[in-house]
Amino acid sequence: MEPYLIAGLIIVAIGGVVLVAVIAERKAEKKRTEQLSQLAAEMGFSFEASGDALLAEGLGRLPLFNRGHSRKTKNVLRKLVRGTEVILLDHQYTIGHGKNQHTHKQTLVVFHPSDGDAFPDFEMRPESFFHRIGALFGYQDINFESHSRFSKSYLLRGNDESAIRATFTPAVLEFFELQPEKWSVEAHAAWLVVVRGNAQRSFRISGPRRVNPTAIAPLLADATKVYLLFAPPMAAEGTA
């Protein structure tokens, strides 16, 4: 067989494999959307296939939603619980390009109390070796001498350090020190996002994954415990 024919057959075969993968992914995404839509109805949440409107409301200003490229926010479940809007959604972003790119897909829990600017802007996520190296060269990491275990485990950043320190009370620090799993939390104005695991991976190392629809309720329960650490008193009373 001529070399050009062999090359042509290889190209066709590769194209076929890619096509099958694309079709399978689309079917899986459609099924997930249908499952989450049904779950929303069962739990008393509204459902929106696209998250564009939510991002425009102000959520898109958080660092996580500006990470990487080819970002998508979808499968949005929303419910107002005594003055706090509780939101679950799928979010994904891509790091790198071509053969070196990797897409991170996550399930996020968002809390949006209606009493105005409730939180100082901050980012908290599991601390890595690279963060520790960066700290030697001035990369910001707010530490607490009284809670060294928290400071060794988490990177905490934000412009208003005094406000952040006031927010991270001993009770908050001790909560995260005692958790068997790590959490990421980002806050801006009246938005607070909670993610199980490291929400801002930059490499191929796997970060938090999208949660199976059957595990949404347990995730929401755990994320609510995190939210209540930071919530304004009235919002905390209503959501508890």
Image (spheres, rainbow, N blue to C red):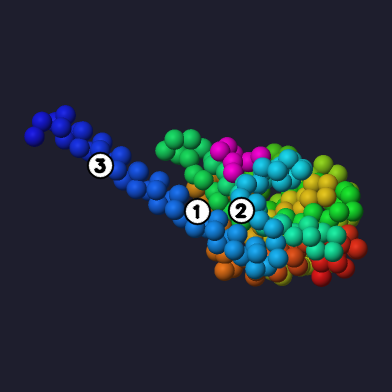
The quadrant of the image that shows the C terminus is bottom right
Q: Are marks 3 and 1 in contact (CB under 8 Å)?
A: no
Q: Residue at x 89, y 50 (%)?
A: 116
Disc 3 target residue: 13
Instruction: Give the left or right position of residue 47, taking residue 140 as reference.
Output: left
Magenta stretch contains residue 103: no
Between residue 108 and residue 29, name the one nearer to us. 29
Would you call the spot at circle 1 few (<14 residues within 10 Å), some (14-19), or many (20 or more)? Answer: few
Single out the mark in the foreground, 3 or 1. 1
Cα–Cα gap, marks 3 and 2: 34 Å
Q: Where residue 121 sits in the image (x, y, percent)?
A: 81, 46
Q: Is residue 140 above or below residue 226?
A: above
First in sequence, mark 3 or 2: give its number.
Answer: 3
Q: Residue at x 75, y 65 (%)?
A: 224
Would you call the spot at circle 2 few (<14 residues within 10 Å), some (14-19), or many (20 or more)? Answer: many
Q: Are marks 3 and 2 in contact (CB under 8 Å)?
A: no
Q: Quadrant of residue 108?
A: bottom right
Q: Amino acid at mark 3?
A: Ala
Q: Which residues are magenta?
A: 66-72
Disc 1 target residue: 30
Q: Where residue 158 sits in the image (x, y, percent)?
A: 79, 45
Q: Are marks 1 and 2 in contact (CB under 8 Å)?
A: no
Q: Where residue 204 sits in the image (x, y, percent)?
A: 50, 48
Instruction: Give the left or right position of residue 234, taking residue 64 as reference.
Output: right
* Residue that protrudes farthest toward the left in the picture: 1
